[in-house]
Amino acid sequence: MINVRAIYLGNEAEAYILDDFIDGINIINSDDNHVGKTIVMQSIMFAMGSEAMFPHNFKPKEYVFIIDLDVDGEAISILRSRDTFAIKKRDELVFEESKRDFDEFWSDNICALPSIIKDGKLQRVGLPLFNQLSFVNQTPRNTSSLIGSYYKKDDNPPLQIVG
């Protein structure tokens, strides 16, 4: 089980910390719009390796994202700046210089990621596919085109989950 313990994002001019998550379901709400609820959720996914899905006026390349996780009782912290990652697990600090390397580290050291056959090749999938399958839009838009996804409904042959 993966539990989010805290999310931090900021740069030299501003910062935001949300560190009061509890075990179970957490609901992030506000009576006001444009206060950061969506940015928090998108920052959690981005820190864990997803594609950037932020509003056009938010510039993720100008921020550093840190997430503290509890994975089956083990504390893991991930720092993401652009597409570079620093992962702290136990007393080990690992640096990964691409999302692909991060997905490999995640799969080998945190939780195995599934592999699929796409375009006739076996490929490991990470959070972009999870986002595409899990986050339902409020409008009838296609998630594969909305977030620039690599995975599309009309893939031929169809995607096959392996393992």
Image: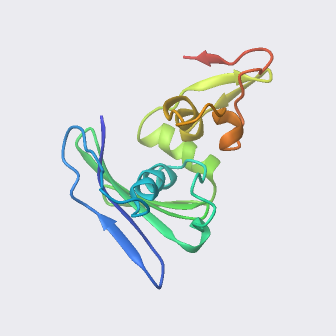
Residue 162 falls left or right of residue 45: right
Please give the count of numbered marks on the rendered protein: 0
Q: Quadrant of the C terminus?
A: top right
Which residue occupies 65% across, 34% down? 141
Residue 125 falls left or right of residue 78: right
Q: Nearer the viewer, residue 34 or 94?
A: 34
Q: Is residue 154 above or below residue 84?
A: above
Q: Nearer the viewer, residue 47 or 27?
A: 27
Q: Nearer the viewer, residue 104 or 138?
A: 138
Which residue occupies 77% across, 20% down? 154
Q: Is residue 125 above or below residue 8?
A: above
Task: Give x and y (percent) for residue 84.
Answer: 58, 62
Task: Give x and y (percent) for residue 49.
Answer: 53, 49
Task: Give x and y (percent) for residue 47.
Answer: 47, 55
Q: How is the image coloured?
A: rainbow
Which residue occupies 50% across, 37% down? 107
Q: Quadrant of residue 109?
A: top left
Q: Is residue 123 above or below residue 65?
A: above
Q: Is residue 14 above or below residue 54?
A: below
Which residue occupies 68% across, 30% down? 123
Q: Quadrant of the N terminus?
A: top left
Q: Quadrant of residue 18?
A: bottom left
